[in-house]
C-alpha cells in the first residue's frame, strides 16, 4: 500500500505569485482549447489531484475517475514489466528477441537478429514508428522495413515495442492484458487501468476533441498493444510512477538501468534541433539533462485527440522529489507542457522537452 497523503482540494497548492493551482490549470487549459484535463502531482509524500473542465458540455468528476487514453504512456508501463522480468531472470536484456519470437514480419532477417530488449527500450531498433495504422486489420501481417541498422542511433518505434510484446507474451504464455494485470495493475491498485476496453469505460471514458473542438468519441482498439492502447486515470498512473521511481519489485541494477541515459534522442535525424542536445533515452523513458533541476525523467503520449505527459524531477538539497502527470482529451494537449511544468516544478528556464515534443 502507498502511504501518501491524498489532498483533493486544489487550493492547497499555491505558486510563488499567490495563484492557486486549480485556477491556474483551468486558465492554461482554457487558453489551449482543452475541454478536460486531469492531473496528479506529488511533492515529497503529498499527492494532489485535479480534474478540470473548461466547457459546459463536459462535467468534471469530483473523484477524478474519468478515464483517458494514455497513448504512448503505455510504453513506460510495459517497459517496467519487462524490467521486472529481467529482475526475475525470465528475459535477458541482450539476448536477441528472435530467441523468444519469430521475426516473420521483418524484411531483413540479419537486422532482426540484432533486436534485443535493451535495443527496443532505448529506441535504437532502427524500425519505423508504424508500418500501417496498428489498429487496422492489415497491420498484424504487414511487412516491416528497417530505416537503418539496429543499435546505431535513436529512432522512436511502436513497431519495436509490439515485437518485444510478442516476445514477452511467448515467454509468459499469456496476453499483455493478463500479464499487466498480474504484474502491475493489481499489485499497485490500479483498478481503472487497462490495455483493453473495460465495461465501466462505457460511462467513465472521455471523448477526444480535435483542435477545432469537434468531438471524435472515446475511440476503440482491436487488440491490446503495449505501445499505445492503455487507458487510465492520473491517480492510477501516479501509483505506477511512484513505483517506477522507487524501483518497487525491481532489482537495484534494473531500476538504475531504466534511468541511465543510453542514447542522445535526436528525434528527426535530418533536422537536428537545439533542444535535442539535452534529451536522451534510458530503458523505457526519456531523460532531459537539465542544469537547473537535474536529470528529469519524462514521457509523452499522442493518440491524436488525446495527449498525455509525465515528468519526474529528482530530490535535491532544497527540493523534494516531484512527479507530475497529466491527461487531456484534446489534440492541443501538448501545447501546455511549458506552462504546466513551470507552474508545478518552479523552473526559471523553459524545459527542453517542450520544444522536443512540439517542434
Image (cartoon, rainbow, N blue to C red):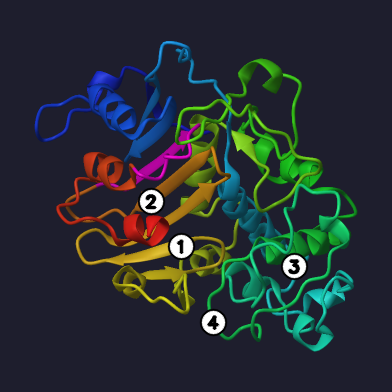
Mark 2 → mark 1, Cα distance in angstroms: 10 Å
Of 191 and 351, which appears nearest the observer? Answer: 351
Task: Tell me the element at label 3.
Answer: loop
Q: Is residue 283 left or right of residue 353?
A: right
Q: Measured along the vertical axis of the image, is residue 175 above or below residue 154?
A: above
N-terminal label among 2 and 1: 1
N-terminal label among 1 and 3: 3
N-terminal label among 4 and 2: 4
N-terminal label among 2 and 3: 3
Mark 2 → mark 3, Cα distance in angstroms: 28 Å
Residue at the image position 38 percent from the left and 62 percent from the top: 356
Of 8 and 164, which appears nearest the observer? Answer: 164
N-terminal label among 1 and 4: 4
> Callout 4: 10 Å neighbours few (<14), some, many (20+)?
some
For the N terminus, give its image quadrant: top right
The residue where tag 3 is placed is: 89
Query: Residue 20 at what x, y percent from top left?
Result: 20, 24
For the C terminus, give its image quadrant: bottom left
The residue where tag 1 is placed is: 286
Q: In the current view of this chain or complex, which residue is farthest to the left? A: 17
The residue where tag 4 is placed is: 153
Query: Residue 228 at what x, y percent from top left?
Result: 65, 48
Camera-near label (4 vs 3) is: 4
Q: Quadrant of residue 83?
A: bottom right
Mark 4 → mark 2, Cα distance in angstroms: 25 Å
Q: Is residue 110 left or right of residue 243?
A: right
> Callout 1: 10 Å neighbours few (<14), some, many (20+)?
many
Magenta span: 320-335
Query: Residue 171 at what x, y percent from top left?
Result: 85, 61
Camera-near label (1 vs 4) is: 4
Amino acid at each position: 500500500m502507498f502511504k501518501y497523503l491524498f489532498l483533493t482540494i486544489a487550493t492547497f497548492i499555491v505558486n510563488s505569485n499567490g495563484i492557486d493551482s486549480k485556477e491556474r490549470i483551468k486558465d492554461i487549459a482554457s487558453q489551449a482549447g482543452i475541454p478536460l484535463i486531469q492531473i496528479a502531482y506529488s511533492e515529497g509524500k503529498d499527492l494532489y489531484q485535479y480534474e478540470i473542465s473548461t466547457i459546459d458540455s463536459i462535467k468534471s468528476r469530483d473523484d477524478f475517475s474519468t478515464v483517458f487514453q494514455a497513448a504512448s504512456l503505455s510504453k513506460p508501463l510495459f517497459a517496467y514489466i519487462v524490467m521486472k522480468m529481467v529482475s526475475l531472470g525470465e528475459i535477458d536484456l541482450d539476448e536477441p528477441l528472435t530467441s523468444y519470437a519469430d521475426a516473420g514480419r521483418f524484411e531483413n532477417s540479419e537486422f532482426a537478429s540484432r533486436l534485443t530488449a535493451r535495443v527496443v527500450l532505448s529506441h535504437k531498433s532502427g524500425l519505423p514508428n508504424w508500418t500501417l495504422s496498428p489498429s487496422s486489420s492489415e497491420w498484424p501481417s504487414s511487412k516491416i522495413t528497417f530505416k537503418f541498422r539496429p543499435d546505431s542511433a535513436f529512432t522512436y518505434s511502436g513497431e519495436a515495442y509490439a515485437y518485444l510484446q510478442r516476445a514477452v507474451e511467448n515467454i509468459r504464455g499469456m496476453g499483455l492484458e493478463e500479464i499487466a494485470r498480474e504484474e502491475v495493475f493489481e499489485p499497485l491498485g490500479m483498478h481503472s487501468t487497462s490495455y483493453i476496453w473495460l465495461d465501466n469505460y462505457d460511462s467513465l471514458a472521455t471523448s477526444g476533441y480535435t483542435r477545432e473542438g469537434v468531438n471524435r468519441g472515446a475511440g476503440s482498439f482491436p487488440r491490446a498493444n503495449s505501445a499505445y492502447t492503455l487507458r487510465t486515470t492520473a491517480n492510477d498512473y501516479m501509483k505506477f510512477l511512484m513505483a517506477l521511481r522507487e524501483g518497487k519489485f525491481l532489482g537495484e541494477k534494473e531500476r538504475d538501468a531504466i534511468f541511465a541515459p543510453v542514447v542522445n534522442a535526436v528525434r528527426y535525424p535530418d533536422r537536428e534541433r537545439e533542444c535535442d542536445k539535452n534529451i536522451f533515452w534510458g530503458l523505457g523513458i526519456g531523460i532531459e539533462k537539465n542544469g537547473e533541476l537535474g536529470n528529469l525523467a519524462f514521457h509523452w503520449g499522442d493518440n491524436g485527440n488525446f495527449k498525455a505527459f509525465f515528468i519526474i524531477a529528482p530530490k535535491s538539497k532544497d527540493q523534494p522529489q516531484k512527479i507530475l502527470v497529466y491527461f487531456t482529451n484534446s489534440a492541443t494537449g501538448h501545447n501546455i507542457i511549458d506552462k504546466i511544468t513551470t507552474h508545478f516544478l518552479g523552473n526559471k528556464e523553459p524545459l527542453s522537452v517542450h520544444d522536443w515534443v512540439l517542434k
